[in-house]
Image (cartoon, coloured by chain):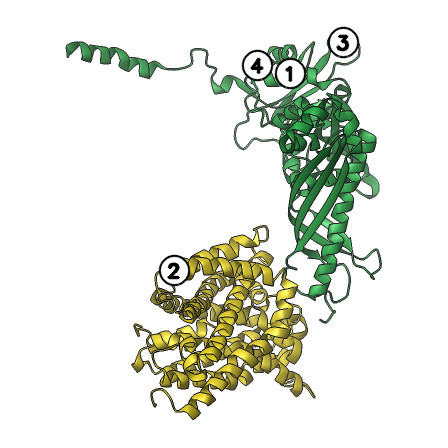
């Protein structure tokens, strides 16, 4: 009995003393919220330039409005070079008073110039390191460097990276930007058949002020989708073409589609608000001929009557359903054509669908998918369900 | 059958089985025909509804323990009576499905726009199964609890919006040469008010000392008064021409409440009233439909039918109405006549006349 009590006495402190012996206190950590990778500047002997956006803790009430790239804002950008991203990440620590911590990194930016190389080389490190999470978002900086993107203010956001993430989150709903995390990107890089897609962001000039104090400012804007084949950037989809892709993925929510009404002037259109889209894909392979049947169901309602006539009757709803179906079908087919003819990249991931549905054919066709994909016969059918028209029936001054 | 419904409960029941959906869309439908006189339409529909109610009470007096479905075969003979019963089962289910979809479309169009419609009709159907599984008395008591609050909230809303009313919008009482249109609108109103025919499914539950005739009359008058007031209020605030354009006039009316800077945005209140009211209305019609089906097929208790019937009603409501245009057009152009001619006036009148000649049943 005595021994038991004694052993308990020895064990008890063990519980109290558990802790991380190499712990770093919170106030010694620098939270890296975003990382951008670009090619190293010319003349440097290193290969890549890594820009870490680190949160700068500020006492409450002292947040300065809108800092300029490491200036007054609640963040600093630390650009360093290195032969690989691991080495560069190490050098971030050398320049910062706080140990950089990547556990909360939410955004991963690939500079366009880097993306023209084989990005698989650079995606090695983020997966291997234990800190970075695969739920982090990835984007491509289109026509600019990732460093420039991270140095540009986003309206109403204190930190550029958070601003970009907010824009992304709003945009996922519209269907103009795909929702891609590191996990998705890796999965597509691994795929024998599928091409990887990544949202692209660009800087565009916009006029500000009026009269005497006119000027331009650069604003960050979603700029379609970057398409990678075997780790190399092969091209971009425009935002509209991206929506054609995302209808098929069932990712579109809350977007407005403009629909002309037959017999009305073409500039008068009806805005249909999309609520949800669903899709299902059936793959069939016969020898070297592959067929894909894509069924899409779109649920929508009337957001705006752009024409002054009575379209309150059920017949108008069926006409609008037809129109919407046709427009969605055109968008999807347009993107299919681009992916088959121009990009020759399986962005729709039809190969993966074939793997799941007809594994035998897939095993036969996967090695020559590059030749198969451009010749796949894709049939798109769209069913549109318009449900309601909000709280009024007809436009002002139009009697029903 | 336990006869537990008192006179007061019967008044509330009559109001609940008509008012909610009639107040949702109908003011704009009647205003389409009768313009600023639309508020007169419910009053002109009242005599029709009263006649229907008295017919139901008269038939009830002859067959005190039976519902419409049960005494129809006794009056018309078995094959014909069962056929009439079957028609009524269909109509009850039709109206029930319409109520479900009205609820779903209203919620989707106004405050919960991103929620799939299935959430609304699904939850309402589930609630109906649960409530009725507990017995009709739960629904009746629930109605007595909620209805006074609902009416009080509705009246409060009307009073609060009254500073924004322009009584001039209600003039002239009847447009020059507008009497025919007013009569058409009254027919529409009558179609809704005569839904009171449903009491013939509930009368066997009413206590003999409840004073059914008086209670039903009181219920109908309160319903008509409320409908008329709501219609007049909407027209006074928005003018008839704008009322016509409104999909949900009373909802829009509550959105127009603003008293000084701080007292506004009462639309949530309107939705609270609607959800409470539509729950009871759905429950009553659903109960009638299931009870009728059970009695038609000779089942002793309708409770076992509830889940399957709920599934059927949900499926029916999605099959019947794809969108709000189909529903509104059906409610405006088909429903009043279809209901009025066949189920609310036609068949009850037929039953009553034959019963009078047969002199069957208990003499009253």
Q: Do labels 4 and 2 share a chain?
A: no
Q: Is residue B62 above or below residue A212?
A: below
Q: In which quarter of the image is the C terminus of chain A?
A: bottom right
Tag nearer the camera, 4 or 3: 3
According to the image, label 4 marks what residue?
Answer: A97
Instruction: Provide the secondary structure element on which disc 3 rests.
Output: loop
Sequence-first tag of 4 and 3? 3
- Label 1 crowd bin: few (<14), some (14–19), many (20+), radius 10 Å: some
Q: Position of residue A45 (x, y in %)?
A: 75, 7
- Real-space CA distance between mark 3 and mark 1, rounded to the nearest whole angstrom: 22 Å
- Real-space CA distance between mark 4 and mark 3, rounded to the nearest whole angstrom: 25 Å
According to the image, label 1 marks what residue?
Answer: A124
According to the image, label 3 marks what residue?
Answer: A44
Q: What is chain A's hue in the picture?
A: green
Q: In this view, does A182 lie above or below B334?
A: above
Q: Where is residue B207 in the image (x, y as percent from the top left)?
A: 31, 78
Q: Residue B175 carries which label?
A: none
| Snapshot quadrant of residue B340 | bottom right
Q: Position of residue B215 (x, y in %)?
A: 38, 81
Q: In this view, does A37 lie above or below B297?
A: above
* Left or right position of A393 against B98: right
In contact (CB < 8 Å): disc 4 and disc 3: no
The subunit carrying tag 1 is A
């Amino acid at each position: 009995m005595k021994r038991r009590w004694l052993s308990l006495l020895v064990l008890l402190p063990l519980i109290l003393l558990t802790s991380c012996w190499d712990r770093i206190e919170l106030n010694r950590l620098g939270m890296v919220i975003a990382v951008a990778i670009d090619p190293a500047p010319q003349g440097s002997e290193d290969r890549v330039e890594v820009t870490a956006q680190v949160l700068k803790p500020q006492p409450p009430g002292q947040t300065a409005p809108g800092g300029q790239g490491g200036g007054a804002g609640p963040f600093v950008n630390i650009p360093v070079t290195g032969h690989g991203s691991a080495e560069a990440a190490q050098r971030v620590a050398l320049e910062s008073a706080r140990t950089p911590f990547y556990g909360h990194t939410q955004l991963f930016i690939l500079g366009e110039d880097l993306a023209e190389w084989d990005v698989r080389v650079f995606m090695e490190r983020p997966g291997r390191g234990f800190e970075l999470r695969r739920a982090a978002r990835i984007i491509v900086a289109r026509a600019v460097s990732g460093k420039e993107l991270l140095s540009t203010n986003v309206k109403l956001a204190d930190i550029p990276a958070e601003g970009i993430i907010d824009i992304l989150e709003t945009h996922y709903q519209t269907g103009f930007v795909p929702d891609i995390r590191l996990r998705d990107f890796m999965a597509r890089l691994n795929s024998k058949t599928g091409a990887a897609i990544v949202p692209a962001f660009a800087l565009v000039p916009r006029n500000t002020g009026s009269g005497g104090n006119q000027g331009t400012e650069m604003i960050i804007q979603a700029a379609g989708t970057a398409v990678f084949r075997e780790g190399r950037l092969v091209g971009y989809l425009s935002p509209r073409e991206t929506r054609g892709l995302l209808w098929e993925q069932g990712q579109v929510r809350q977007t407005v589609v403009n629909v002309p009404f037959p017999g009305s002037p073409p500039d008068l259109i009806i805005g249909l608000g999309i609520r949800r889209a669903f899709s299902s894909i059936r793959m069939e392979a016969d020898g070297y001929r592959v067929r894909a049947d894509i069924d899409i169901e779109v649920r929508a309602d009337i957001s705006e009557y752009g024409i002054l006539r009575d379209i309150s009757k059920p017949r108008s709803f069926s006409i609008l359903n037809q129109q919407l179906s046709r427009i969605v079908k055109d968008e999807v087919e347009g993107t299919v054509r681009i992916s088959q003819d121009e990009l020759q990249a399986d962005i729709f991931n039809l190969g993966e669908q074939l793997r799941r549905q007809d594994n035998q054919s897939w095993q036969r066709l996967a090695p020559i998918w590059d030749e198969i994909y451009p010749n796949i016969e894709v049939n798109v059918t769209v069913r549109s369900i318009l449900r309601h028209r909000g709280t009024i029936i007809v436009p002002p001054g139009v009697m029903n | 059958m336990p006869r537990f419904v008192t006179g007061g409960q019967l008044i509330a029941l009559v109001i609940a089985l008509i008012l909610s959906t009639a107040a949702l869309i109908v003011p704009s439908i009647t205003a389409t025909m009768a313009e600023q006189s639309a508020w007169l339409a419910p009053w002109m529909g009242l005599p029709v509804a009263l006649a229907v109610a008295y017919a139901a009470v008269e038939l009830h007096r002859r067959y005190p323990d039976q519902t419409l479905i049960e005494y129809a075969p006794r009056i018309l003979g078995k094959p014909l009576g069962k056929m009439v019963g079957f028609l009524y089962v269909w109509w009850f289910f039709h109206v029930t499905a319409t109520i479900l979809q009205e609820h779903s479309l209203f919620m989707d169009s106004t405050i919960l726009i991103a929620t799939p419609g299935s959430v609304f009709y699904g939850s309402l159907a589930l609630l109906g199964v649960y409530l009725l599984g507990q017995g009709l008395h739960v629904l009746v008591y629930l109605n007595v609890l909620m209805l006074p609050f609902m009416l009080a909230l509705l009246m409060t809303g009307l009073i609060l919006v009254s500073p924004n009313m322009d009584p001039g919008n209600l003039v002239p009482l009847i447009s020059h040469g507008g009497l025919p249109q007013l009569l058409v609108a009254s027919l529409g109103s009558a179609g809704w008010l005569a839904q009171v025919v449903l009491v013939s499914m509930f009368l066997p539950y009413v206590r003999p000392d409840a004073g059914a005739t008086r209670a039903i009359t009181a219920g109908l008058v309160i319903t008509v008064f409320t409908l008329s007031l709501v219609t007049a209020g909407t027209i006074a605030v928005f003018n008839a021409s704008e009322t016509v354009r409104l999909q949900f006039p009373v909802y829009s009316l509550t959105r127009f409440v603003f008293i000084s800077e701080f007292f506004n945005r009462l639309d949530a209140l309107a939705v609270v009233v609607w959800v409470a009211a539509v729950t009871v209305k759905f429950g009553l019609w659903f109960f009638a439909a299931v009870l009728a089906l059970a009695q038609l097929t000779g089942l002793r208790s309708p409770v076992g039918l509830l889940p399957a019937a709920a599934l059927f009603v949900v499926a029916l409501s999605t099959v019947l109405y794809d969108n709000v245009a189909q529903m509104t057009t059906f409610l405006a152009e088909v429903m009043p006549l279809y209901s009025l001619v066949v189920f609310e006036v036609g068949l009850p009148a037929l039953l009553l006349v034959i019963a009078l000649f047969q002199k069957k049943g208990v003499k009253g």
